[in-house]
Image (tube, helix red, strand yellow):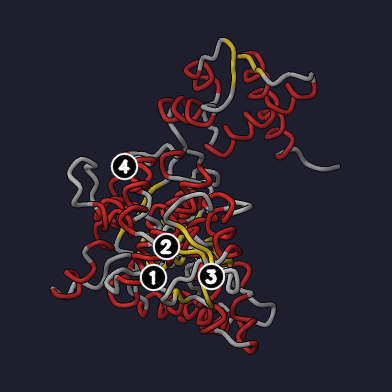
Amino acid sequence: MNDSTIAIVELLLTAKHYTELSNLTPDDLPPQIRKAFDKKGEIKRPLSVTENMAKKATGVESPWDSISDLMFTEKDNFSGEMCLTQLDLAEKWFLKNTTPDLILTNPTLAYIFQENDSLGISYEDSNTSNRPIQADRFWIDSLLSEYFTEDDQEMLELVDIKAPEEIETKLPDLVLTTNQTDELEKIRLAIKNRDYLAEIGLREVGKLLFIGPPGTGKTSVARALAHSLSLPFVEVKLSMMTSQYLGETSKNIDRTFEVAKRLSPCILFVDEFDSVAKTRRSDEHAALKRAVNTLLKSIDEVSLVRDEVLLIGATNHPDQLDTAAWRRFDDIVHFPLPDINMREKIFEVTTKYMAIENFEPSTLADLTEGLSGSDIRLVLREAVLEALSEDRTVLNQEDLVAAVTAIEKRDILKSMPLE
């Protein structure tokens, strides 16, 4: 049986059971099916499967042609709606032609078939692994349309909002220190047990400060965490919201925190944190002092437990931060330059899809002392492009060694004075 037929039958079974089972939520629908039935951020019952709807949900070009010869399917020629005429027969056919792994990707069907002992599937496992609706771009866009009017557009221009499905960086793709891994696990547990934390009155949780040199993965980890937790990612660079009209800076800070609260649950990532929260001086402009005070007040007033906003600040210059800013964070996560073992792992992880002859990541790790993870990716970029210029897609160790030298020369040029 071809995949197109299985996909359409799966869709019809999903629509039928989801319509009849009011205890199921949009999180129980696979993302592609959910997106097809979305109407301004809502999935309304009943789910009517027309040919156009089926195309959107499955990508099958001719949905009815794929199932028209099955004895348990029917199509209304007037409305174009397709349906199942014999549910029991359709379920038996589907189980015969599919696999438990496929059913696990569909919580609605996992809920229906979980009592079939021969399948060994769990609805809870299926639901947990399924991407929730809050991770979908269409859901975020619907919230933006609902919560923000045309008068609020200036507010939205201050932030970059990404849906988890749009984030390409995944945590398994990153090389983390033990401390970084431990801190991320703590925050995952805090989110999972948010209700418990509220019950015991522990509300000052979920404010992290990432510190370390440029290129050590602060932004990448924050984005990957958003993908892992299926949370919208609201990113703001404080330097970009510092208005040329100093009086606007405080207002901009307020606006960005308001965006995060309206989109919650989410991650609010505040990059270049030191650009505003610098150590205050007695001779500093009054507007700058107000901006710092506004930032500190905004941090105080946002909460993972109450507002479902995980705040992550990031800075390359922790020495410049105001002491009051330090106190606002319950955890500091250090992002150091990678040591030799980390550099070796970074080479191994970042080259896993590349063909490299005589590859020796340990040797490359020895040669790249002082380079960041971002620098190592530049080394690989240089090596790949150089090989392509010679019409090669298979690299060798010599290509990578030469690329290390090229990147080191580039760094020397950066520090040369211009005549």
Instruction: Tell whether label 1 touches label 2 (CB within 8 Å).
Output: yes
Looking at the image, residue 40 sits to the left or right of residue 18; the answer is right
Q: Tell me which corner region of the image, top left, top right, bottom left or bottom right, holds residue 196.
A: bottom left
In terms of sequence position, does the residue under pointer 4 or pointer 1 come before the other? Answer: 4
Instruction: Tell whether label 3 touches label 4 (CB within 8 Å).
Output: no
CA gap between label 2 and label 4 equals 28 Å
In terms of sequence position, does the residue under pointer 4 or pointer 3 come before the other? Answer: 4
**From this viewpoint, which residue is outermost toward the right?**
419
Q: Residue 169 carries which label?
A: none
Specify whether residue 226 is in view. Answer: no
Looking at the image, residue 390 sits to the left or right of residue 219; the answer is right
What is the secondary structure assignment of the residue under circle 4?
A: helix
CA gap between label 4 and label 3 equals 53 Å
CA gap between label 3 and label 2 equals 26 Å
Residue identifier under label 4: 100
Between 228 and 65, the one lying in front of the other is: 65
In terms of sequence position, does the residue under pointer 3 or pointer 2 come before the other? Answer: 2
Residue identifier under label 2: 231
Q: Residue 276 carries which label?
A: 3
User: Which of label 3 and label 1 is nearer to you?
Assistant: 1
* Mark 4 Cα-neighbour bin, 10 Å: few <14, some 14–19, many ≥20: some
